[in-house]
Amino acid sequence: MFTGIIEGIGRLIIKRTVGGGLAFDIEAEFDIIDPQEGESISVSGVCLTAYNITGRRFSVDVSPETLSRTRLGALRQGNLVNLERALMLSDRLGGHIVSGHIDTMAVVKNRQEHGNYTLFTFSMPDSFDRYVIEKGSITVDGVSLTVNSCGQALFSVSVIPHTLKVTTLGELKVGYSVNIEVDVLGKYIEKLLVVPGQNSEAVSNDNVNTDFLTKHGFM
């Protein structure tokens, strides 16, 4: 489990083919204190298992499933990635609950500077529209952000200078792809509301009331 608050940037040192997937050697810009072989590390929003942890370097394997759902396969030697180690129970939850399981990819449609802020607009498959709400949380390449506005297959976020400086978001240009994880709470709520026997798009609101929400822990 992660928070979407990036710990630092890493650089892809080696990329190699292993079976049907890939393996990366990554060097972090920060010391990996008290490393645990096999611990989870978020790499640009993707939860991966770290091994061969030595100093600031570690290796991860990227499965075919992960390659099909994320932009990790497009990374090249020397590319930068956002890194976050797994959340400890004693840590502050500065962002929001992030699983590291990517839902889809989005594309940068527009980038505009507004004073000290940078406004990004992204497009993504419209099947994920229902999970994105104004002022809700979304994870872009592992970074927890607040949705400024959203429409059909589009959403925008405003990024502060500090976040641009300490993450890879500052490198984003129109046409670049990013990994997206929507707020997991929305998906759980949807599952509770889906009528058995209907598809996930068919949600019944007939029985959604104060009693229902209280019974299921939402109030």
Image (cartoon, grey):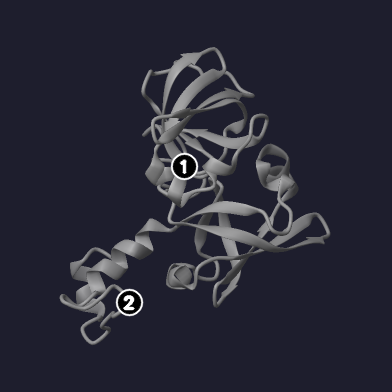
Vertical placement of residue 129 versus 19, above or below: below
Q: Secondary structure at mark 2?
A: loop
In this picture, residue 24 sits left or right of residue 121: left
Indicate the quadrant containing the C terminus: top left, top right, bottom left or bottom right.
bottom left
Numbered circle sitting on residue 96:
none
Asked whether residue 219 appears in the rendered view, the answer is: no
Residue of label 1: 46
Q: Amino acid at mark 1?
A: Val
Vertical placement of residue 129 versus 118, above or below: below
Q: Give the residue at x 18% y 69%.
A: 215
Asked whether residue 216 appears in the rendered view, the answer is: yes
Q: Secondary structure at mark 1?
A: strand
Q: Give the residue at x 55% y 12%.
A: 55
Question: Farthest residue in the right direction?
Answer: 115
Residue of label 2: 201
Compare residues 38 and 62 and report the one nearer the observer: 62
Vertical placement of residue 129 versus 107, above or below: below
- Residue 14's spot in the image, x, y percent? 58, 24
- Residue 111's spot in the image, x, y percent? 75, 61
Q: Give the residue at x 45% y 68%.
A: 128
Compare residues 36 and 57 and report the one nearer the observer: 57
Q: Give the residue at x 67% y 42%.
A: 168
